[in-house]
Image (cartoon, helix red, strand yellow):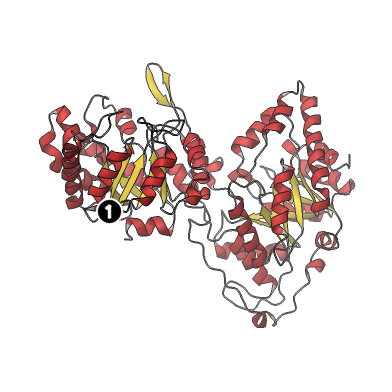
Amino acid sequence: MKSYLEKVLERPIVLDGAMGTMLYEKGVFVNACYDELSLTRPDLILEIHREYAAAGADLLLTNTFGANRMKLSEFGLGDKVAQMNAQAVLLARTAADGIALVAGDVGPCSGFRQALTTNNAATVASAFVEQMAALKAAGVDVIFLETFSDLKELQLAAGLARATGLPVHASFTVNENGETALGYTVETIIEALERDPSVDTIGLNCAIGPAGVFDLVDGIVKRMNKPLLVKPNAGLPREVGGRMLYMTSPEYFTEYAKRFIERGVRGFGGCCGTTPAHIRMAAKTVKSLSGVKHHATIKVFTEEEKRAVTVVPPSKKSRFAERLLRGEKVTSVELLPPKAPDMTALFEKVRQCHAAGVDAINIPDGPRASARMSPMITSVLIKNATGIEPIPHYCCRDRNLLGMQSDILGAYAAGLTNLLVITGDPPKTGEYPDITGVFDVDAIGLTQMIHNLNHGRDLGGNLVQPPTAIFIGVGANPSAIDVRRELDRTFRKIEAGAEYAITQPVFDADSLLRFLDEIDTHLKRIPVIAGVWPLVSYKNAEFMRNEVPGVVIPDSVMERLAACKTKEEGQDTGIEIAHEIMARIASRVAGFQVSAPMGNVQMALRVLGKA
């Protein structure tokens, strides 16, 4: 097994969640010594560790947060330090089963708001040494210092942990203002730990929820040299029936897990209030993200290898391609495939678009990881029944590489020549959270695979004669959390063979214009079609803003919709906002893809000026 540092540097890891929360839920009173349960209730501790391991945690923390002589003496257990720590490591190691790593959890010896002094420094140091020696002897992979509020005590503990020869993680806790209980700021502590040679990785845990932690570290993590790991609480607790409960759902927690990893955080887990349900959902998402999951390598063939076939020029692949590459403004309407096999209603909507002069119909592939009719079959039926060109989305979530190649070849044989290649939403965002994603490749790899098929080569390098002639589109998100990462991925898609791009719905024209300025610096330029979503109400905008990955709606838009008094006024305002955005960006984009909200085709056509 790779070491702790090797794993953290190789890819972001998933940490486990709260131990105390789970013990409380299983009936242990808050005034009990939780550390002692490793000896008195080993079955219970092992059960919780196993739940986190099964949820996908890469790192299990031992049940030893307060297992030092100073804390244990408060319960009359000061003579059980070695025994308690050894047993806790054994339980975590058993649950890890050779797959997850085990971290020796060490909390502060001082009490809340108590600073290290010259009078107690020797006693504190002695307690740390005793506990860390026991953890080292029992075989932990890393000493995990967490929930410290005194920088001096944290650095003392880090120096003593370094003496064990093990990797050292140093984590602290702050309030909503970014300060510890003793007044140290996030910036002060991170700067000190960055310079401290005893510390290998830095952490922020406890006290506040994922949104609060994200606001504090956003912008800092990119400037850090040492890996940052975060373990936020499940939001702030609320009193319900006399009990303090954490109300943050696994879905909300997981959305922030994705944001943290995209920002550059190297590890994400949970503190107070989090459960295996939070970690399970977060792990599925984190481990499917590009840059975390190991994707299969798609071979890039040389020009000489490609010359064995006659390649169809992009402009000859479809009517849509011809118009787009000729410089004409193209239009498309996005319609969802049905949830049942009856195509009657969808055909009627498509015919309205065709009659209005829309160039193409976009068909999403399992949007938000929902179960709908195959976009490929839907597209074939639309093309055969109406004559309009479909642009089916094809995502990497649901099929392995062999299945993807079979689908692409079959789609082309059935007459589909336009595709939009996307990585796809992880299953956690959809209706089936226990379904696993495949993600053999991401959108970059899939683009390369289709590009190879267009040049007469399959996955194995075998000759495909005649080659496919698929017009390859890709997605782009001008309002991504990490715009530099999104630009890098867009450039890599272009280099892999992308021939056009369609953006996520644009609600901030300036963000798109800045994004296009960067795209234009690439040697190979491709047409960019702007996604447009006419919002129908404040509630619709709130859902899009909070629940749909990749969508960013400015406060100014939210305020305009909030002022609407009727349904009709909300729709008119949504269309007005869409028209304003389109007017700002019209000269810079190759066309517009308009979504039909809730299947409202007439609203989409009004946005395009075709109704």
Q: Which residue is mark 1?
A: 141
Give percent across and percent down for residue 164. 21, 53
Q: Is residue 476 left or right of residue 321?
A: left
**Residue at the outermost left position:** 79
Whether residue 250 appears in this view of the structure is no
Residue 431 position by quadrant:
top right
Q: Quadrant of the N terminus?
A: bottom left
Give percent across and percent down for residue 610. 89, 42
Q: Is residue 315 left or right of residue 29?
A: right
Residue in the image at 66% along x and 48% along y: 373
> Neighbour class for label 1 at 10 Å: few (<14), some, many (≥20)?
some
Whether residue 132 appears in this view of the structure is yes
Q: Is residue 91 left or right of residue 262?
A: left
Q: Quadrant of the C terminus?
A: top right
Q: Is residue 589 above or below residue 607?
A: below
Residue 524 position by quadrant:
bottom right
Q: 521 or 13: which is nearer to us?
A: 521
Q: Count all numbered tags in the image, as a single digit.
A: 1
The amino acid type, in three-letter code, at marker 1 is Asp
Give percent across and percent down for residue 8. 39, 55
Residue 166 position by quadrant:
bottom left
**Residue at the outermost top position:** 241
Residue in the image at 47% along x and 37% along y: 213
Residue in the image at 65% along x and 40% along y: 552
Q: Kindly state the secondary structure of the residue where label 1 is placed.
A: loop
Residue in the image at 81% along x and 46% along y: 350
Q: 195 or 459: which is nearer to us?
A: 195
Give percent across and percent down for residue 97. 28, 53
Q: Is residue 176 left or right of residue 482?
A: left
